[in-house]
Amino acid sequence: MNYLTHLNTEQNKAVNTVEGPLLVLAGAGSGKTRVVTYRIAKLLDIGVNPAKILGLTFTNKAANEMKERIKTLTQSNVLISTFHSLGARILRESIHHLGYKNDFTIYDEEDVIKLLKACLKELDLVDKKMDPKAFRGLISHAKNDLQSPDHIDESGATTQIEKVFPRVYARYQSHLQNYNAVDFDDLLYLTVKLFSDHSDILEHYQDRWDFLLIDEYQDTNEAQYAMVRMLVSKTNNICVVGDPDQSIYSWRGANIRNILNFENDFPGANVIRLEQNYRSRSNILDAANNLICYNDNRYEKKLWTDLGEGEKIKHYTGNTEQEEARFITEKIRYYHEQHNIPLKEIVVFYRTNFQSRVFEDRLLFSKTPYVIVGGISFYQRREIKDILAFLRMVHSGADYISFARTINIPKRGIGGATIEKVRIGAAQENLSILDFCQALIRGEPLNTAIRLSAKQKQGIQDYLQIIHELTRIHQECSLKELVTAAIEESGYLKALSDDPETFDDRKGNLDELITKAMEWEQDHENPTLATFLEELSLKSSLDEAESTNDRVNLMTIHNGKGLEFTLVFLVGMEEDLFPHANARGSHSALEEERRLCYVGMTRAKEYLYLTNARFRYLWGMGRTQRPSRFFREIPTKFIEKIRSTSRREQKPHVEDEFIDEIDQTYPEEGKAEHFSTGDAVFHDQFGVGVVQEAYQGSIGLSYKILFSKDNQVKNIVAKYAQLTRL
């Protein structure tokens, strides 16, 4: 293959650097996917066995696209996987070395919360301040940092949740193993533990793959980093592609130091910069380059393009957020009708989810179709999860969470207390949930006595009959027939008919699930129920973000990573909104906000609008807003200030200049209780927290509070917060 005809000079260097550690600094729109694809093609071209190559990325969509490109290019099948799918693959083969069975179940978020509620009840910690979601967040952070329950440091615990966390974590993990289940974070955590505890198993996988390629390396967390370091420690044949300037996921564990320290981790590594951009006009790129230069923690690079200068970036300031939304809706219609830009090529990016409401109102009013990307996924809908839970019971009779979800579909009069007794009884008898129920109905001698009414006994017997029948169908029939049978045998459609208003929509979703099972079976050489359930557990709503319908996209900037649009609106660019108030006083947090702005700007191919409002309602109060500091960091030669053509907005207002010195007026401060550093407080929305600092902000007394619910520091305004002392 003649790579020179398809690649620029730097891309060609990256493709032809075959052995040893390689860091490819791939700027936005620089063709990194082509480089990864062609580099794998190069390895195959020089005789490397496809089975010796492993590619890792972060979404199923990206993995599937790369797999298809390689297949088209080389006619070879190479393993391209997400980190979590790789962990699931490894654990399916080797988890028995950790005391689990290989047919484990992967719990989703809802299952995890149910299990945590059960753990809290067992530990007598049922209290409204003991939020299961707070423990879920702490457990996730611990696993991503590779901390077992035994290694949690209690000495720094300041809140009740933090103090009891080690006990809850230990009980939770113990139950997961008893139920032969793992959560999403375990797919990495247990894989690293497997490698750490069993050097022979690690060596087996080191020998399986000689070449490792990783996309979006700047997004890796501690567990992913450890897994990668272990896998390549024998050969050092690792190629990572990424961009520190697009590292925007620290809130979910991503560590920018992983990519910044690559040359220290792999001495002698080659570093190649991909700086030619194939997406955006030069005005957009030059503005983004100037903005990101204000960050310290980065590799120096400068994006350029030969696509031409293009139009200047437009800056619009509305008097209110309603004017901002009205202006943007008018521009969307203008570009769609006058420039023939499809609506699906237009995006409105905002910093936080609550900002979507005003744009939804305007788009609905103007009858402009739109989609909120990152909404409820197909696989998160109730009816889909119910049927998948039946399938999981067929797959693993030990799955308590799926049992609890399905035992009363349809209603069988088996209450929460009885279900809990069944769970405890199964654990005490060392039986799976299904085997314990079977023994209970048969009247076999058990150490655990559970009184059941005649109706409950009949209900459990009917349930067992359904699962046994589905198990038979699973052994004899196709996956499509199994899904169809699960819907029919369970009487699910009759249960849905109790709500006639939603029946058609929910039945349509179930029909789609049957279609999914049929398509999935056709697309896989060795289709099994286990791999089907595993793939659906790993699905993300963002994997299905792109729609075939022509609709305007509304999304947070975080959800826009990796996408591109002809016309981009970056809205709400005001201090405390973007950059977010949570970034106050933190250099690293402010740098991430700036990277987020950079990512938003570099999604634009042709047209970019940056907008803000002078006045908006935030946290229930009207506020005079200051323009974002990011405006000052973009040279004015790249920006054109514009006003709306709408007459209703042609009213006197202050000059469009950056007015940090404006006197802001706010409601008079109420009699809020004062707190000191170290005080424990409770907030209705954020839960339990500890005051880190008290200070006088621009709108009065404020506190920096570390909340245990998400383990994040938030800047709270005293007069709005209604904090309660604990």
Image (cartoon, rainbow, N blue to C red):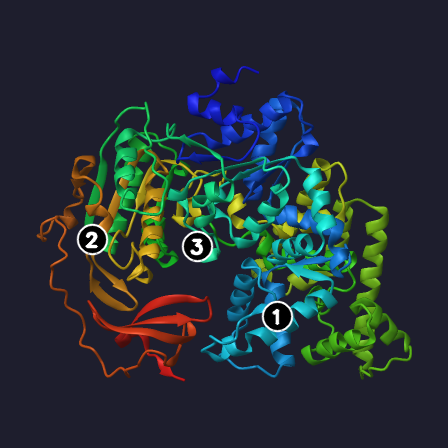
Report the quarter where the C terminus lies.
bottom left
**How many C-alpha atoms fall within 10 Å of the one at disc 2: few (<14), some, or many (≥20)?**
many
Dot 1 or dot 3: first in sequence order is 1
Report the residue at 75% width, 36% height from top: 525
Element assignment for label 3: helix
Give the alpha-carbon distance from disc 1 to disc 3, as whole Å: 25 Å
* Amino acid bearing label 1: Asp
Which kind of residue does numbered mark 2 sit on? Pro
Q: Are the residues at dot 3 and dot 2 in contact (C-beta closer than 8 Å)?
A: no
Which residue is painted at 44% across and 48% down in the image?
A: 559
As shown in the figure, which amino acid type bears the numbered disc 3? Ser
The residue tagged 1 is 150
**Circle nearer the N terminus (3, 2):** 3
Of pointers 1 and 2, the one earlier in the residue sequence: 1
Residue highlighted by disc 2: 627
Nearest to the eye among marks 1 and 3: give it. 1
Q: Is residue 693 above or below residue 653?
A: below
Q: Nearer the viewer, mark 3 or mark 2?
A: 3
